[in-house]
Image (tube, helix red, strand yellow):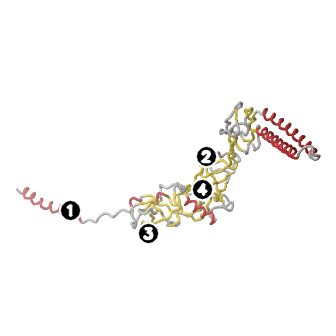
Amino acid sequence: MPKTRALVTAVPIIALATIVLSGCKQELPPPPRQTPQVGVVTLESQPYVLTHELPGRTAAYRIAEVRPQVDGIIQKRLFSEGGEVKAGQQLYQIDAAVYEATLKEAEAGLASSRSLAERYAVLVKSRAVSQQAYDEAQAASLQAEASLEKARIDLRYTKVLAPISGRIGRSAVTEGALVSNGQAQIMATIHQLDPIYVDVIQPARELLALRRDLASGRLERVGDNTAKVTLILEDGSEYGQEGRLEFSEVAVDESTGSVTLRAVFPNPDRELLPGMFVHARLFGGLKSGAILAPQQGVTRNTKGEATAMLVNAQNKVELRTLRVERAVGNRWLVDEGLIPGDRLITEGLQFIRPGIEVKAVPAGNVKQDTQATPLPSG
């Protein structure tokens, strides 16, 4: 009986203790909020070469099509296909036998006509021949001179000469082929490759900007209306010769609104060939205090404006609107909105908002690719 009474008395005490403990647990304060951690890059100013890169293709400086100017059979080809030829160098020999005979006939005809005209000149003074007969003899002599000159020209044209210096392509005719004056088929083509053109196609609005940069002196000049330009080849290497970009002669394509600019480059080693895809790079001056911001830390808002999140002196997140000029490798060249010493957030952006306090640590997601264009020597 005493055991039962003790058990009954203990139950309310345990229940009461449970209620008291439960109430104490509910009154405990919540744990403190953990400060978000973000990765930052401390920005520094640095010198940067401002450049404009224009895609284009190479084109021969001059192109000459070799064609026959007389009829005949090709006897010899006197050049190596793909080799260099000089202006005036003989390329083909056309059978000259008929033209040599024609020349001798013309020489004989001229001698006879001159002899007759000389006799008539004496006889006309004594009225032994009429003035009309003398005039006809003089005309016949002049006509014989013209026939002789034409025969000489035709004989000279049996030697097909190179009209310009350059690299000659494959021959379209072989020994024994019949060619004729005025034929549609060309015999060979010569390309002058030194110097060589680079044709650059750009939107008209960008041409206006380039013209303004040239007028203001931001583009390095080499003449009154030309700018200094270098060349980047298809494999990414830089061509060893500097050229000049002409702004005076441009053609606007009405269907696309684009313009074609022409640059001229020395090509003494024939490294550049017609049809190659290249990039022309214009030097636009040196910006000594450039800010290059990692692209991981720059986004766009709904208005299309460039924005960035930064950690200020109070370790709070700050939102800024930027004005960026161009991409430089994996960074943006920033004109406004950032200064040296700013801590740009590049990691943890999804966990923060403007105004909250954060813990800043060096970012690990940014490669040090800051200078896409090397500084000029000297």
In front of the other: 172 or 143 = 143
Residue assigned mark 2 = 276
- In the image, is residue 244 above or below residue 165? below
Left or right position of 218 against 349: right
Looking at the image, is mark 1 or mark 4 earlier in the sequence? 1
Amino acid identity at mark 1: Ser
Alpha carbon distance from label 3 to label 2: 56 Å
Local crowd size for mark 1, using a 10 Å CA cut-off: few (<14), some (14–19), many (≥20): few
Local crowd size for mark 3, using a 10 Å CA cut-off: few (<14), some (14–19), many (≥20): few
Indicate which disc residue 251 carries: 4
Mark 2: secondary structure:
loop
Looking at the image, is mark 4 or mark 2 earlier in the sequence? 4
Residue assigned mark 3 = 314
Residue assigned mark 1 = 22
- In the image, is residue 27 above or below residue 78? below
Looking at the image, is mark 2 or mark 1 earlier in the sequence? 1
